[in-house]
Image: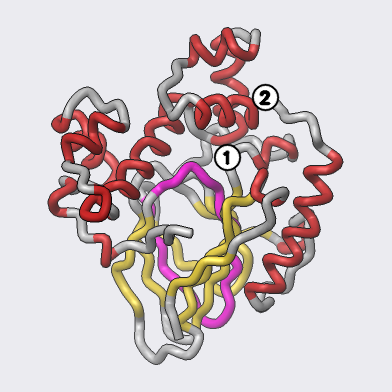
Amino acid sequence: MQLYSEHYVTQKTERFVNKVWCLDNSIGESLIENKLVLPNGCFNLAFITGNSIDVHTSKAKYEMNEGVYFCSQMTNKVLVNIHPKTKVTIIQLHAWALSLFPKYDLSDFTDSIIKINPDELPFKIKIDSDSHIVVNTINSYFEALSNSHSEKDIIEKICEIIKLKNFEVSVSDLSQSLNSSQRLLQIKFKVATGLTIKKYIQILKFRKSVDQMLNANLEKLSLTEIALYNKYFDQSHFIRKFKDVTKMTPKMFNPDLYFLSKKR
């Protein structure tokens, strides 16, 4: 059985959900340890069945037993140990998805994980549901949500502009585009995501750079070219930012130790 798998949602659901991914050690007899996950600018809902997983973030160590967990924005790499007879199904939510539910104040909630009551979720999924059932359920919910919220809120608009500008945009630029004060945009974004706008952009740039590194042989890009392509000042600047997240240089980076997105 494949340990890591990805499952994709419909185009309309992709407005809020990036993908569903699974870590399946449900028939395994041994601990899978020291696997790593990189930050990507998303929130995660994790459904755990069986025994447990251990997760080490930059702030704390978590033992996650069977149940549902909300994972905040991560700013550094995360270490994961998956115990035998355990399966984890993860719904990866875009940064703006929770802004539709203003009761959540996430302004001081990064690199953290909390266990939640499944009844608090706006959609109903049994934690032991098959991945295809999870995908079908969230497609149904988020397609309806997209239809009922055709107008994008300020957080989604900020993220959309950042993506359109290929991560090369300042808070001042956003302020002019959205006809809003810089301070108000910063406050709203921090409350909704736990990140500053600048930090969010840094994370997205970093992930794009990692994806290019993984395909550098295919695309014939050097480390310097990757750095310049992603608007780092130079190779040294890129290496410093890379070490901030991974605690190692790009040349030391071993993708086999990480759970990394597949190319569709």
Left or right of 29, for residue 251: left
Q: Quadrant of residue 123?
A: bottom right
Q: Secondary structure at mark 2?
A: helix
In space, the residues marked 2 and 1 are separated at their CA atoms by: 12 Å
Magenta span contains residue 103: no
Other-residue count near label 2 (Cα within 10 Å), few / some / many at <14 / 14–19 / ≥20: some
The residue tagged 1 is 95
Q: Name the main secondary structure of what is drawn in magenta.
A: strand
The residue tagged 2 is 154
Q: Could you say which is closer to the camera, residue 163 or residue 20?
A: 163
The dot on residue 73 is none
The residue drawn where x is 53% and y is 77% is: 87
Work out which residue is located at the far right of the displayed protein and give it: 148
In the picture shown, does residue 151 fall above or below 248? Answer: above
Say what amino acid the circle numbered 2 marks. Answer: Ile
Left or right of 145, for residue 193: left
The reply to whether residue 180 is visible in this rendering is: yes
State the image coordinates of residue 122 (x, y, percent, origin top left). Answer: 78, 54
Other-residue count near label 1 (Cα within 10 Å), few / some / many at <14 / 14–19 / ≥20: many
Left or right of 79, for residue 153: right
The residue drawn where x is 62% and y is 23% is: 188
Q: How many marks?
A: 2
The residue drawn where x is 50% and y is 85% is: 26
Q: Quadrant of residue 244?
A: top left
State the image coordinates of residue 18 (x, y, percent, origin top left). Answer: 58, 51
Q: Secondary structure at mark 1?
A: loop
In the picture shown, does residue 102 fall above or below 211? Answer: above
Left or right of 151, for residue 216: left
State the image coordinates of residue 203 (x, y, percent, origin top left). Answer: 40, 38
Q: Could you say which is closer to the camera, residue 17 or residue 225?
A: 225
- Tell me where the magenta segment starts and ends, as one range: 39-57
